[in-house]
Image (cartoon, rainbow, N blue to C red):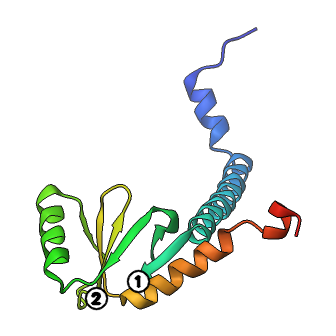
Amino acid sequence: MKPITATEVKESWETPEWRQAEKKGMEIWDRVMDAFLTTILNTIKEGSMNVGFDNFVPWWRVVAILQPNSSAAARYREKAENEGRLVNISAGRKRRSIIVTDTNQAIISSVAPETLLGRLEAKRIEELPNPKLCWGA
């Protein structure tokens, strides 16, 4: 059996049939990746709470929602900023709340604390187990 040279391999790859197969494979790959990324994004959105401008935080990580104009919240924000734990997602808008997570991150949001609390409570209610299933009521 005669060995195949690199030139012969290259020539076989440059056929129109190969290019067509490669293009079709890339189209399939693109569709698979789009579906995969859409699934991941939907999973993140389902288990997370919108904190403004399509930014999401896992609702179970939220420990506190603070008013940014209190002196305690200002000290906490300043300390978090100095330690590199501050995330500003207000997009240049007025600071309306500071979200504290169980990982000790401080997230500045332009969404009002009352709105965030409503979203958090809605997520918690969605995730609570059905009492009929738990206690047989």
Nearer to us in this view, 18 or 134: 134
* The N terminus - image quarter: top right
The residue carrying pointer 2 sits among few (fewer than 14), some (14 to 19) or many (20 or more) residues within 10 Å by Cα, namely some
The residue carrying pointer 1 sits among few (fewer than 14), some (14 to 19) or many (20 or more) residues within 10 Å by Cα, namely few
For the residues marked 1 and 2, what is the alpha-carbon distance in whole angstroms? 14 Å
User: Sequence-wise, which precedes: disc 1 or disc 2?
Assistant: 1
Q: Which residue is mark 2?
A: 96
Residue 92 percent across, percent down from the top left: 23, 86
Residue 115 percent across, percent down from the top left: 45, 90
| Residue lying furthest top | 1
> Would you say 19 lies left or right of 115 here?
right
Q: Mark 2 is on which residue type?
A: Arg
Name the image quarter holding residue 70.
Answer: bottom left
| Residue lying furthest right | 136
Nearer to us in this view, 54 or 106: 106
> Would you say 69 lies left or right of 136 here?
left
Nearer to us in this view, 58 or 122: 122
**Circle 2 sits in a helix, a strand or a loop, which is it?**
loop
Q: Mark 1 is on which residue type?
A: Phe
The residue sitting at 35% across, 55% down in the picture is 103
> Would you say 66 lies left or right of 121 here?
left
Name the image quarter holding residue 105.
Answer: bottom left
**Circle 1 sits in a helix, a strand or a loop, which is it?**
loop
Name the image quarter holding residue 41.
Answer: bottom right
* Disc number for residue 53: 1
1 vs 2, front mark? 2
Q: Is residue 54 visible?
A: no
The residue sitting at 67% across, 50% down in the picture is 22
The residue sitting at 15% across, 65% down in the picture is 81
> Would you say 81 lies left or right of 30 here?
left
* The C terminus - image quarter: bottom right
